[in-house]
Amino acid sequence: MKLSQALLNQDRLALTRILTQVENNSEKGRAALNELFPHTGKAHLIGITGAPGTGKSTLVNQLALYYRQEKDYRVAIVAVDPSSPFTGGAVLGDRVRMRDLSGDPKVFIRSMASRGNLGGLAQTTSAMVQVFDAAGFDVILIETVGAGQAEVDIAKLAHTTLVVEAPGLGDDIQAIKAGILEIADILVINKADRPGVENTERALRGMLELAHPTTRVFQHHSQRMVVDAPEMSKEDKKLWFAEIKCTVAKDGEGITELGEAIDRHIAFLRESGGWASRERTQLQSTFDSLLRESLFNRFLDELSPEIYEKTLSKIMTREESPWSAVQSLLNGRKA
Amino acid sequence: MEEGNIRVLVAKPGLDGHDRGAKVVARALRDAGMEVIYTGLRQTPEMIAEAALQEDVDVVGISILSGAHMALVPRILELMKSNGQKDVKLFLGGIIPDEDIAQLKEMGVSGVYGPGASTEDIVAQIRKDVPKRA
């Protein structure tokens, strides 16, 4: 029997083999993706991102338990950790926090190294997710590498993005910066038993209020003043207002409430048409990057290596700028 | 990348809590360009075989200091075989008496490394034992 057929019949060995082929972007992997693609598009993809040490893996462990116990979903986890920029090696340690899931045949955890990709995911993470989707997992939890401020690729892949924060990581200026906080559908303040949680919550809530004011809250000489915001426009009613949830993942506190917030977000996506538009963004970004890569490769194939080298050395001697070199290569100049 | 990196599961079965050796080996394999999945302490043979399957590793490296190797090793090998993972190589480290080594190798253990073993030897042996795969 073919491997992809075995995968559709829930064979775990076939699944794990195909995941490897896809991760390595091999010929077999691409063939399998072609066959599996018609079976994709059903799973709910949840992204979990945030700074290193905020408790992403522990939270993923708890969310997976929630989906197993409350909903009897089949749960897949893709956990990405960084590769060494020097040796290409990696230590993938997310499983250490996910011991509770061991022995459950309806949970499948796969660790991935980022293999030089920036943005918080590996190059082939979205293809790996497609494989899990075809294999019939109901929910796929995607944990990014410990992310700084701008690793926002996850928002293009996931239906629902959780950004995990912890008390003490930044003030209200950090909270109004562009980047990772903007992509949150749900902001999770984990380690909420630690001191400083009120400050973190106030800073994040203030940031959200600035984005979509429902009421206007002013802190003026430590007086709190609340004024109703102007009537919401029709456009605004179609917007999702990011929720803030506090959790203590190591003890399982706040997980049910977080799960319910995720449910509300899915329901919102389905009603508002957001599900389809996220699907479009995701497939478009896959399509675009494949197109870019194959056009680049095709162009290099057609270009003789001597011309490439000659152009490169001209750039290195500052005879020609990279911009003009590209332009003239595209215009068909022969060196 | 057409050819994958070598993937290694590093696990510590049994009840002793000393994982420094396992961490040193994990770090050395990382520096040799391998992808190491580290699972931490107190793993059962079932947990190790399950992780080896889900991660589709080429090598499983386990560290045992408790003296339970003659019980744990055959169980892990048997579970991996019944999962269909027949080509995965098992490496063993920790405190293993010399008189057990021959028997362990007969069971299918690829290498046994005690205190003082060089991490370079472990890397070289893994590179030799694991065929390139696409």
Image: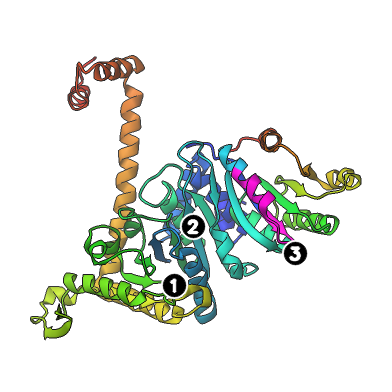
Q: Which mark is residue B15?
A: 3
Q: Chain of mark 3?
A: B
Residue at 70% of width from left, 57% of height from top? B18
Q: Is residue B29 left or right of residue A146?
A: right
- Residue position for label 2: A79
Residue A292 spot, x, y in % from top left: 30, 39
Residue A95 spot, x, y in % from top left: 57, 60
CB under 8 Å between callouts 3 and 1? no
Q: Is residue B73 left or right of residue A25?
A: right
- Viewer-nearest residue: A298 or B94: B94
Vertical arrangement, residue A113 with respect to residue A176, above or below? above
Q: Chain of mark 2?
A: A
- Viewer-nearest residue: A239 or A99: A99
Q: Amino acid at mark 3?
A: Leu
Q: Amino acid at mark 2?
A: Ala
* Residue at disc 3, secondary structure: loop
In the rendered image, residue B15 lying in the magenta stretch gets the answer: yes
Q: Note whether residue A270 is visible.
A: no
Residue at 36% of width from left, 62% of height from top? A158
Q: Chain of mark 1?
A: A
Q: Nearer the viewer, mark 3 or mark 2?
A: 3
Q: Note whether residue A40 is visible.
A: yes
- Residue position for label 1: A191
Farthest residue to the right: give it: B99
Magenta span of residues: B11-27
In the rendered image, residue A314 lying in the magenta stretch gets the answer: no
* Residue at disc 1, secondary structure: loop
Mark 1 neighbour density, 10 Å: few (under 14) some (14–19) many (20 or more):
many
Vertical arrangement, residue A172 with respect to residue A221, above or below? above
Vertical arrangement, residue A100 with respect to residue A335, above or below? below
